[in-house]
Image (spheres, rainbow, N blue to C red):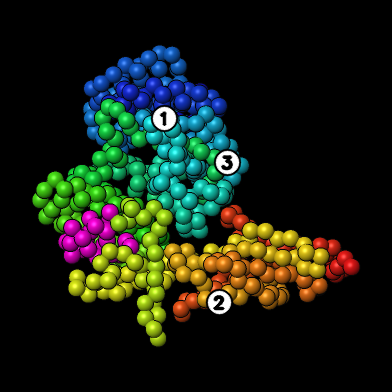
Amino acid sequence: MIPLLSVVVPVHNVEPYLSECLESLAAQTMEDFEVILVDDGSIDGSRRIAEDFMARDSRFRLVEQQNMGPGPARNEGLGRARGTFLAFADSDDVVPPHAYEVLIAKLGETGSDLACGAVLRLVDGELEESILHERVFRRPQLCTHITDKKVLVRDRTVWNKVYRADFWRRHGLRFPAGIYEDVPVAMQAHVLATGVDMVDDVVYHWRRREEGETSITQRRSELPNLHERLAAIRSVRAFLEDGAPELLPEFDALVLEKDIVFLFQALEAAQEAGEDLVPLLALSDAWLDELSPRALTTAPSLRRLELHLLRRGLIGELRSVRDFRRSRADGTRVRPRGFRNVNWYGDYPYFRDRRRLGIPDEVYDAREELKLIAKVDDCAWTGTEYRVRGQVAIHRVERKVGKVSVWLSDGRRRVPLEARRVGRHGVVAGIDPRVLEGGGPNWRLQVKAETRGLVLKGWFRDGDAYAPWRFSVPGWSRSGMDIPQ
């Protein structure tokens, strides 16, 4: 019988981890599937473990090939897949029991071409957030698309997904050779899909290996590895330029946020070991030349400083900036400079002697990175008014906000409130319900902060929660306000 799902698993020298991976597949809550194990020329005990599983569970099949890499191994498995749906798993990772049931159920509801879900990193037996997938799956959304939900540009892996097999074959998707073979394919599938389902369930545990052969992704700062990563970046950019150019800014920004770090690490390690930096510097130029000028100029200020030093080959100074970044877990400070024309700059290394090094002021410009922090701590009835206590500050700015204006809005009306400052960041405002008569049942508290030429607006949040703070008028009815006397 044709299975509902085919799971393709490339296997290469993963003896310490393979059993746990295969056990997790065998334990899936949906049972109608096949697992195609492709032994990519393993020389350890991986093949024996795969054969044992095949003997115990008829849903497991084993295919052998000479060592060609994970991409060709996946393609070999795809050629033998019979399922209505396709999934991929790496042989050192773990798939949670409900993963495939959840993803296939969503596809059954919506008719989308692929479904994807959240990922956790498996480190020393403990689960932690996957930095690669952070912020992607916080809110579930069905029947969306990467051009509408651009955060999906960050979803560059194939193993946290289930695909419709007819969608995959209709578009002739195949994995290239190389060590970053899944990145181009994952991006192509997102763009080519007519619908994508995002779930907030954790559907994959991505392992960082502690023993045996180090994984490809853990050798990211090796020169050949960096060349392969650049090849993957070029492949994705070429595809996006033709198929979805509106995604290029998000993709370039992601490269500058995540991928470039491995280039920095390689340069730091090479300098510390006294190795020749010329090949790495040439590769660095190739990376930066690949990205759009807009991406380079709109990167966060601290990253712009690193890129500026990298482009000029100032690796000692770059190392100092990298050490500075690592030492500032709580974030770096932004300070105003100037009198008539005030601007806000990151207080980073070499800022005070930037002219000696020839670093332009705009490299340190951090005005666009400043964010207003406004939150309500409590609200209480005094007998005559509701008294709201909260805090207003600017993220990364130590100084007290110069001027604070507060008002309520129901979407149609705006009601100013008198705000009293308390301490460094505290704000107290009173709300008389009578002034809200005729308005809607729910009001939101808005704030404008002004200091040294900087003007920021935003909504008060409910304590440390992300949601806006709302004030519900007591006694409200559709016929009007009913204020208790």
What is the x, y in percent for residue 114?
49, 44
Mark 1 crowdedness (10 Å alpha carbons): few <14, some 14-19, many ≥20: few
Provide the residue designation for mark 2: 403
The residue sitting at the right extreme is 485
| Label 1 SS | loop
Mark toward the viewer: 1 or 2:
2
Provide the residue designation for mark 1: 125
Mark toward the viewer: 1 or 3:
1
Task: Give the magenta-colored segment's residue range.
Answer: 302-323
Give the prevailing secondary structure in the magenta stretch.
helix
Q: Which residue shows up at 11% across the image and 55% down it? A: 278
Label located before the other in sequence (1 or 2): 1
Mark toward the viewer: 2 or 3:
2
Provide the residue designation for mark 3: 106
Res. 243 visible in picture? no
Position of residue 312 in the picture relative to residue 145 (left or right): left
Q: Give 336 or 26, whichever is nearer the viewer.
A: 336
